[in-house]
Amino acid sequence: MLFDLIALALLAFGFAVLVVTFLWVARLLALRSHRRAARKLQQALSERAAEEPEPPEPESTEDSDAEAAAEERLATGRAVILGANLSLVLGLLACALFWLSPLFAVLSGAGLYYGGRCLWTAWRRFRVFVLRAFIGLTLSAISLGLHWLSLSGQLGAVLPFLVSP
């Protein structure tokens, strides 16, 4: 009975981590989208001001474009770091808690998603290999393997020290 309560509490904790993670990522994506919309609004206002007869103040669009690009690159870098951290944490939790319930495979899937996305974005945008994301991706894949071995009944033959006699 106590084991079931602990398993349920850990499952609820895992689900809460997943929900908070999705909310966090949604907030980051909304922030990025808001910045793009603000930039477009600023461009539209400057075009409208250029059509009016009064001379606009001299602004360098190259500087504003460079600042916007630098700001977007910084936001992408933060998202890569966040994805690497999430992948590592979810991979560790998935490996540590695989024996409680097959539902913890959701943590493995989320770890695979964040790790893969982080590695892809970091390599495509920055030409950087993020070791933390690779470790999280590997742990998530190992956890999926452990789930499969556990569900198919082969875990005791492969890893006898994990199965109680």
Image: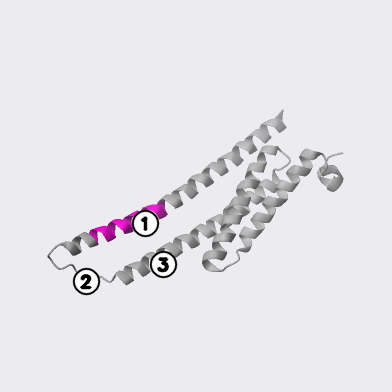
Which region is colored magenta?
Answer: 31-46
Mark 3 → mark 2, Cα distance in angstroms: 22 Å
Q: Earlier in the sequence, mark 1 or mark 2?
A: 1
Q: Where residue 116 is drawn, which disc sits there?
A: none
The residue shown at (53%, 56%) is 82
Mark 1 → mark 2, Cα distance in angstroms: 23 Å
Q: Are marks 1 and 2 in contact (CB under 8 Å)?
A: no
Q: Where residue 70 is drawn, which disc sits there?
A: 3
**10 sits to left or right of 146:** left
Q: Which residue is under mark 2?
A: 58
Q: Nearer the viewer, residue 21 or 96?
A: 21
Rendering coords of residue 150 (x, y %): 78, 41
The residue shown at (32%, 71%) is 63
Helix, strand or loop for disc 1: helix
The residue shown at (70%, 38%) is 102
Q: Where residue 36 is drawn, which disc sits there?
A: 1
Q: Are marks 3 and 2 in contact (CB under 8 Å)?
A: no
How many residues crowd around disc 2 within 10 Å: few (fewer than 14), some, or many (20 or more)? few
